[in-house]
Image (cartoon, rainbow, N blue to C red):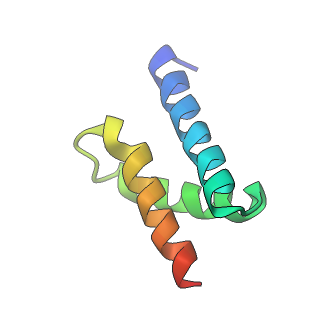
Amino acid sequence: MEGNNLSEFKKHRQSMEDLCRILELPWEKISPIYVRELKRMQNRAKIREYLPVLVSRHVKDILRKL
């Protein structure tokens, strides 16, 4: 894995862990939704550094509506 990809992976993993803590939900609930939304948003992202924040916000919205 390249350094940049590893850095991105760590940021996304941290975002998922933060969501688990903030929303008090298990990893198993957060992870599939986060990964799905990340894949969807990656294709359109112009600035990849914003993805962890944008995906996290979107996942929070999805989970709050459930």
Give coordinates of residue 17: x percent, y percent: 65, 45
User: Residue at 22% across / 43% down in the picture?
Assistant: 46
User: Residue at 25% across / 39% down in the picture?
Assistant: 47
| Res. 12 in view | yes
Which image quadrant is residue 34 in? bottom right
Give coordinates of residue 48: x percent, y percent: 33, 38
Give coordinates of residue 15: x percent, y percent: 55, 44
| Residue at the bottom extreme, as displayed | 66
Viewport quadrant of the C terminus:
bottom right
User: Residue at 50% across / 23% down in the picture?
Assistant: 7
Report whether 48 appears left or right of 5.
Answer: left
Report whether 12 appears left or right of 43.
Answer: right
Identify which residue, 9 or 2, lies in the foreground.
9
Exactly how many numbered labels are in the figure? Answer: 0
Report whether 13 appears left or right of 58.
Answer: right
| Res. 39 in view | no
User: Residue at 57% across / 74% down in the picture?
Assistant: 63
Identify which residue, 10 or 36, lies in the foreground.
10
| Residue at the top extreme, as displayed | 3
Give coordinates of residue 35: x percent, y percent: 57, 55
Q: Is residue 5 above or below residue 64?
A: above
Viewport quadrant of the N terminus:
top right
